Image: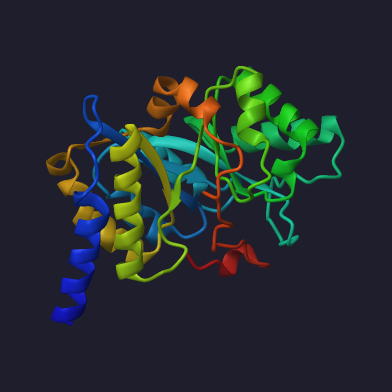
C-alpha cells in the first residue's frame, strides 16, 4: 500500500508541480456536485464539504427541496440539474427535456423544473448527449434561463454539443465543464482527476470540475480541498468563473476532446437510486 501511495503522490506531483504558473492572481477552480436530491444521506455528506461549492439538484426528486434549502443556508450555490435526452435513451425521471417536444411543452417542463429547486442561480444538463446537439431546443433553453436570470453550465456529455455556443450567442452567462472527477469510483483515480483540474487552472487561470456525491469522492475532496490555497488555487462558485471569463469561454475550440458522458445514470425506479 505504501508503494502504491508513493506512486500516486509522484504522479500527482508530475501533473501539478511541473506546470508553468498562471501569470495572473490565484488560479481559480469551480466545483459542482451533481445528481443530488434522491439520497438524503449522500446529499448531507456532500453539503459538509468546505468552501464555495455549487450543488446541482435533480428537480422533483424526494429530497431536492430540503437539501437545496440547506445548501443555501450554508452559503453554498444551488443549481438545477435538468435531465435531457441522451443518445442512449436512458430513463430520465421527472422534468426531462426530450428532443421530440414542441416549444410550449418544452418550456413548460423546464419552468416547472426551475421552480422545483429553491434558490437556484444556474442550471446544467444531466446527460443530454442527444439534446445538446440540437440548436432549437438549446435556444428554447436559453430563452427560459434568460427570463429567470440563470447562468448555464454545459456539462459536455458530447463533443457535438452546441449548448454553450448557443448560450453565448443569446447573451446567457455561461461556462463549460473541464473535468469529470469520478467517472471511475476509485479514490486513486479521483485524486488524479482532481490534479488534472488543478493543472488546467494553473495553465489558463481557471477550470471547472463536476463530481458526484459518492463516498469515495467525498473522502478525496475532504482531504484535498483544504490544501488548495497552498497550491495557489482559489475555490470559487461556478457563476464567478462564468462571469469573469466570458471571452475565454467563447473562444475555446469547439472540437476539444474534453468531454465525457457522466457514468451516473438515472435509475428506472427513482426510489431505488444509489448515489
Horizontal side of residue 85 vs 273, given as left or right? right
Image point (74%, 57%), residue name = 87
In the image, residue 255 above or below residue 62: above
Return the x and y of residue 126 as percentages of the image width and height: 60, 49
Image point (59%, 65%), residue name = 271
Foreground pick, 188 / 117: 188
Q: Quadrant of residue 11?
A: bottom left
Q: Quadrant of residue 146?
A: top right
Quadrant (top left/top right/bottom left/bottom right) for the N terminus: bottom left
Residue 114 in view here:
yes
In the image, residue 30 above or below residue 94: above
Q: Quadrant of residue 88?
A: bottom right
Colour scheme employed for the rendering of this structure: rainbow
Horizontal side of residue 200 vs 267, given as left or right? left
Horizontal side of residue 180 vs 270, given as left or right? left
Foreground pick, 51 / 161: 161
Image point (55%, 66%), residue name = 273
Image point (23%, 55%), residue name = 222
In the image, residue 222 above or below residue 107: below
Foreground pick, 173 / 270: 173
Return the x and y of residue 260 as percentages of the image width and height: 56, 55
Horizontal side of residue 204 vs 105, given as left or right? left
Return the x and y of residue 63 as percentages of the image width and height: 50, 51
Amino acid at each position: 500500500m505504501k508503494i502504491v501511495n508513493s506512486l500516486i503522490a509522484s504522479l500527482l506531483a508530475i501533473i501539478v508541480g511541473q506546470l508553468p504558473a498562471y501569470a495572473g492572481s490565484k488560479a481559480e477552480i469551480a466545483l459542482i456536485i451533481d445528481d443530488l436530491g434522491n439520497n438524503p444521506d449522500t446529499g448531507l455528506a456532500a453539503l459538509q464539504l468546505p468552501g464555495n461549492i455549487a450543488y446541482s439538484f435533480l428537480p422533483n426528486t424526494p429530497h431536492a427541496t430540503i437539501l437545496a434549502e440547506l445548501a443555501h443556508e450554508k452559503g453554498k450555490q444551488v443549481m438545477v440539474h435538468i435531465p435531457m435526452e441522451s443518445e442512449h435513451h436512458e430513463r430520465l425521471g421527472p422534468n426531462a427535456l426530450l428532443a421530440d417536444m414542441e416549444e410550449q411543452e418544452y418550456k413548460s417542463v423546464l419552468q416547472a423544473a426551475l421552480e422545483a429547486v429553491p434558490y437556484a442561480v444556474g442550471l446544467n444538463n444531466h446527460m443530454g448527449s442527444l439534446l445538446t446537439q440540437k440548436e432549437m431546443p438549446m435556444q428554447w433553453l436559453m430563452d427560459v434561463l434568460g427570463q429567470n436570470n440563470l447562468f448555464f453550465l454545459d456539462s459536455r456529455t458530447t463533443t457535438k454539443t452546441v449548448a454553450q455556443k448557443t448560450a453565448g450567442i443569446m447573451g446567457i452567462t455561461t461556462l463549460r465543464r473541464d473535468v469529470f472527477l469520478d467517472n471511475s469510483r476509485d479514490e486513486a483515480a479521483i485524486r488524479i482527476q482532481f490534479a488534472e483540474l488543478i493543472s488546467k487552472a494553473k495553465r489558463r487561470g481557471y477550470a471547472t470540475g463536476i463530481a458526484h456525491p459518492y463516498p469515495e469522492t467525498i473522502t478525496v475532496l475532504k482531504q484535498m480541498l483544504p490544501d488548495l490555497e497552498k497550491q495557489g488555487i482559489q475555490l470559487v462558485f461556478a457563476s464567478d468563473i462564468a462571469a469573469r471569463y466570458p471571452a475565454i469561454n467563447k473562444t475555446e475550440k469547439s472540437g476539444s476532446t474534453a468531454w465525457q458522458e457522466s457514468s451516473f445514470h438515472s435509475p428506472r425506479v427513482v426510489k431505488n437510486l444509489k448515489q
